[in-house]
Amino acid sequence: MNSGELAKKAGEILSGKKATDILKIDVTDKTILADYYVIATGRSMTHVKSLAENLEEELDKQGVSPLRREGVREGRWAVLDYGDVIVHIFNDESRLFYHLERLWDNGENTEKMN
């Protein structure tokens, strides 16, 4: 699966588990770190943890495993690094504080996914 398909699939999985404010941001021309960032919000630290674990489990079933994962146990900001797609799942407070979209959105590279 290519990076665009992976980003879309990640957004669909997160949406299916009631994540909110899901954005797919094309960062291909902005950084060499990834092609897409998927950013989502969970209602609580438990929800953030559950979203990250479910996403990892569902993508594992399709043969896609993260290269790295950070913050899942804490539940404030979980990051799953799939190489060309990096998924950020925040609780409300952390999402407002870090506001990653501000850094990467140029008005034409962002797609709302739910």
Image: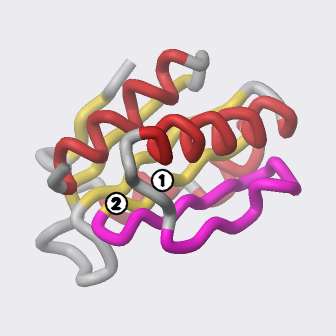
Say if mark 1 contacts mark 2, CB within 8 Å. Answer: yes
Q: Which residue is at a point 47% across and 59% down the rendered structure image?
A: 65
Up the image or down, 38 lies above or below 98; here it is above
Q: Which residue is at a point 63% across and 66% down the rendered structure image?
A: 69
Boundaries of the magenta span = 67-84
Q: Nearer the viewer, residue 98 or 45?
A: 45
Q: Which residue is mark 1?
A: 87
Q: x, y (%) of residue 53?
A: 68, 42
- Distance of mark 1 from mark 2, alpha carbons? 6 Å
Q: In the structure shown, which secondary structural element does the residue marked by tag 2 occupy?
A: strand
Q: In the structure shown, which secondary structural element does the residue marked by tag 1 occupy?
A: strand
**Quadrant in the rendering for residue 77:** bottom right
Q: x, y (%) of residue 4?
A: 17, 48
Mark 2, other Cα within 10 Å: few <14 / some 14–19 / many ≥20: many
Q: Which residue is at a point 38% across and 51% down the rendered structure image?
A: 63
Amino acid residing under circle 1:
Val
Q: Which residue is mark 2?
A: 85
* Picture quarter with the C terminus: top left
Q: Locate residue 75 relative to residue 81 in the image: left or right.
A: right
Q: Nearer the viewer, residue 97 or 71?
A: 71
